[in-house]
Amino acid sequence: MKELLELIAKALVDQQDQVSVKVIEGEQTIVLELRVAPEDLGKVIGKQGLTARSIRTILNAAGMKLRKRFVLEILE
């Protein structure tokens, strides 16, 4: 799942080397912390958060098969 998030994020941003994902695992929930360059933050979030919401939807759909809940946190 980490690789999927990295792939999506790198496709959206200009500075691909600044993309990093940290995984924090719980029993049923896995938190994915996404960090990008400050100037690319708007590209990952999108207008009114639509891009971020779409990424969360993809993660939730992929997580259904694994019976895990994925939470995306976009950090500055």
Image (tube, helix red, strand yellow):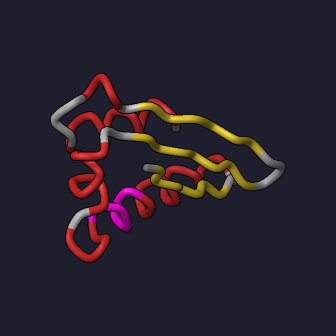
Position of 49 relative to 65 (above/below)? below
- The structure residue drawn at horizontal position 30% and vertical position 23%, both measured from the top left corner, is 17
Position of 29 relative to 32 (above/below)? below
As drawn, the residue found furthest toward the bottom would be 48
Q: Position of residue 43 (x, y in %)?
A: 21, 53
In the image, residue 11 lies in the stretch drawn in magenta = no
Identify the magenta region.
Answer: 51-55
Q: Position of residue 44 (x, y in %)?
A: 29, 53
- The structure residue drawn at horizontal position 29% and vertical position 52%, both measured from the top left corner, is 41
In the image, residue 52 lies in the stretch drawn in magenta = yes
Q: How many marks?
A: 0
Q: Quadrant of residue 15?
A: top left
- The structure residue drawn at horizontal position 26% and vertical position 76%, both measured from the top left corner, is 48
Q: Position of residue 36 (x, y in %)?
A: 35, 40
Q: Main secondary structure of the magenta part?
A: helix
Q: Is residue 8 among the parts visible in the rendering?
A: no
Position of 73 relative to 10 (above/below)? below
Q: Position of residue 55 (x, y in %)?
A: 37, 56
As drawn, the residue found furthest toward the top would be 17
As drawn, the residue found furthest toward the left would be 14
- Front-most of residues 59 and 17: 17
- Front-most of residues 73 and 56: 73
- Whether residue 47 sits left or right of residue 49 in the image: it is left
